[in-house]
Image: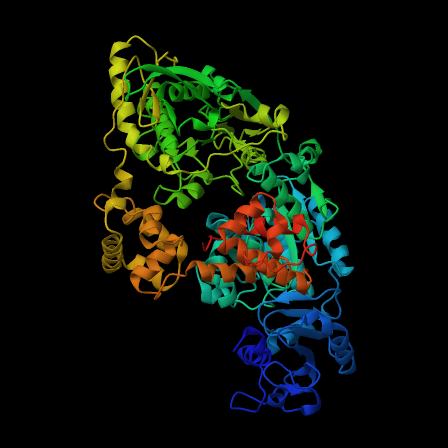
Amino acid sequence: MQKEAKARLKINNLLQESGWRFFDDKIGARNIEVEGNVNLESLGDDFEHGKGFIDYLLLDTKGFPLAVLEAKSGSKDPVVGKKQAEDYAKAKRCRFVILSNGDTHYFWDLNQNAEKIILKFPTQKDLTKLLTATTAMSLSGIDIKDDWIVQSQGAVAEVDRKFLRDYQLDAINTISSKFDDGNRRFLLEMATGTGKTLLAAALIKLFLKTGNANRILFLVDRIELADQASQNISSYLKEYNIAIFKENKEQALQNQVVIATIQSLSYNQNFLKYFGQFDFNLLISDEAHRSIYGNNRAIFEYFQGAKIGLTATPKDYLKGIDEKKLVETDPRKLEKRVLQDTYKTFGCESGEPTFRFDLKEAVTHKPPYLVNPVIYDKRSDKTNQMQSEEGWQDAFIDETTGEQAEETFKIRQLERKVFSDSLNHLIVDEFLKTAKKDPITGEIGKSIIYCISQNHASKIARILNEAADKNWPGKYSGHSGVFARQITSNVVGSQELTKKYRNNQLGNTRIAVTVNMMTTGYDCTDLLNVVLMKPIFSVSDFVQIKGRGTRRHAFKNELTGQVVEKDFYHLIDFFGVCEYFEERYDYSEPLFLAGKTEEQKQQDKYELIIKERTAQYESMKSQETLGVQMEMPIAVSHGKFIYIGTDFLVRDNQIQIGEDCMKVDREAYRNHFEQSVKDLMGTDKDFESALENNDVDETERIAKEKLLEKPKYYFSLESLRKAYQTSNGLADFLRKAAGVIERLPDKYDRMNKGFEEFKLVYSDTPYEKLNYFENIYQCYLTNPDYRHALEKGNLGVLDDQTFGGIVPVGRIKRDEVEKVVSYIKESNIAYVN
């Protein structure tokens, strides 16, 4: 039976799946009436007999009308019947309308302006809940004072009482007024450190207190932010039940406030599995631009409640961009598009947020709420050369020919292609000289150093600890805690370390060395130094990282009672990042960022080489002082350049070890992996439990620690994808190996799921265009010639049936084609062919 011939059957099944009944049964009385009480079967499977549509009336528990469902044949646009459905609904005194052709469904609340795409039909409970919400009082009906949160904190120390600031009260009043006027989407643009989570808690209380929400979803993009939000909001609002979805799914289903990561909801489409579209009356998205990126937006649009976005990244950072001059792969083009989409998605098409409180306002306020940095530009000769147009040019010995040649290096190749131990020593030495001191103890102030890679972070932490042993013997060792601690995602317990560092529970540790952790939402008020030991080219990343130091803090001497206020922090920049964003951010030239490659994964193989060669050179230069940059030539080994000393030719026979597994027969390799997973399940109950409970984060954490990249088979995500010939995520491979799922979701599964999510993201698209978009989407993913033609700008393939194109000429504009292609790329949907 063809797709078009199933409309009635599909609609009947969807109604029954959502708990609607055509007949009395043991669960309850029937709650569906059919217009005119006709026999549905007599209308045909596609309503082909009669007028081509039928109205269903959905009833409440007392038999009164709740909603009208207008059903059309599969070939019809459901929205065509909007007017007649509205008339019927008003005649029956219904507030809700559902329009469906069996494949595409719209939900329309007649009290609001537009219908919205839904993936499944609302339940009787959903509709009843929406009706009940109309009895809520207006948000403006409550006069919010600065002690709004204090009232909910219970008995806490005076220092922990959270009073709302004037701008937070202004933000609440702005949203209250606009919500009462019928707006349901809001964007709050507020500088890092201005208390977005506290403001969110105040809004959560207001919506719950007034009855405008009975359940609220707080969305974040990383589990450590979920933990932090849970701790903070729970301490602010003690009268409400709050849970993290990842940690206890069953409990989260019952709680008034659910905190969830995008990843935990998207994995295996958990948002569909565990939640209905009407479960939450309010969704708050922290760092809003991340929640709508790619197919994340499908989750965002799935839930039908009001939506509040929080962001610290102003769109104005990209006001000088000319998109037409940027190639499609330029990350600045993507970044601008994401920020623009953020404003549009949250109802701010004009580019102005619902409410704004920026860094300038915060630091100039009397008294100031935030502090500015003192910037130290500390570029070395080599990094300065690498950032120039000419690059760093130096000589090396080509191991193949034995001849001396020249190579030019740019800044993005540092620690990826070229290594310099002397440079690392130099910048550590300069950091120790420049770091702001703790005003009470006189030690190096608490610092976060952002490095290029995990291996780079490991090197920097080692050099810092060696310097501490030399300068302050015995002070930073044993139970006292190390001077510098590496806190990167590959370190076991890294999330817990970030909390302990923030709360001063790591002994005398003064410095956290990281890569991409401790950026978004990391609140460490006594931080005095933010150190950039890597180049940064993303505006939003730069805003977040420099924002770590802006929070105010009162340092107190517990013996004397002396209090010293933090009035600035040091932003120590070894790569000209500040100058880049202040003076050299040229949008007319394409910028290509190096992604994480296999080269990065192999850097640890060079650690031994660097150590050995540097030791040889140090023995020759024993009079040199640590921290003085030594002039060394470049040596090369398989494309890796190491700044080590005169004429050292580097050889490394272990460089290909990461590829060993690729020489093994794929079938045998899969068998080895699946047996290894089962063995781990037998010895690690936490791993077995995480698999059974679908705990993705914990499953992957244990696997990375105990199974991946170990000798013998050297399992890695890349090698597993090659062995299984699919691009699934690590959790899928683990679940398949453990027997939790029978087969891996394939490209077709992901392709079909991807377009369902696309329809949610662009739910305001007319039905006819949705069909055209689906044809472009499928042809692009399944036909490389079609894909290549579109990449070249040739729209002639849209209606070329030899490529599968069925879109009539002129029906789709170029920017609409780009919208479909951009969605595919941003969502990482794999090509089927």
Quarter holding residue 454: top left
Rendering coords of residue 149 (x, y %): 63, 53
In the rendered image, residue 635, in percent from the top left (x then y), is placed at 32, 19
Q: How many marks?
A: 0
Question: Could one spot residue 452 in this view of the protein?
Answer: yes
The C terminus is located in which quarter? bottom left
User: At which x and y percent is residue 522?
Assistant: 51, 41
- Inspect this view and state whether residue 199 appears: no
Relative horizontal placement of residue 73, taking residue 653 as reference (left or right): right
Q: Nearer the viewer, residue 817 or 331?
A: 817
**In the orientation shown, which residue stands out farthest toward the front?**
802
Q: Is residue 292 left or right of residue 645?
A: right
In the image, what residue occupies the spot 67% across and 65% down? 767
The picture quadrant where one finds residue 57 is: bottom right
- Indicate left or right for 682 with 179 as reference: left
Q: From what the image shows, is residue 266 above or below residue 378?
A: below
Q: Is residue 132 above or below residue 831?
A: below
| Whether residue 766 is situated above or below residue 547 in the rendered picture | below
Taking the spot 54% from the left edge, 79% from the top edge, the residue there is: 13
Q: Residue furthest left?
A: 712
* Lateral position of residue 170 relative to residue 379, left or right: right
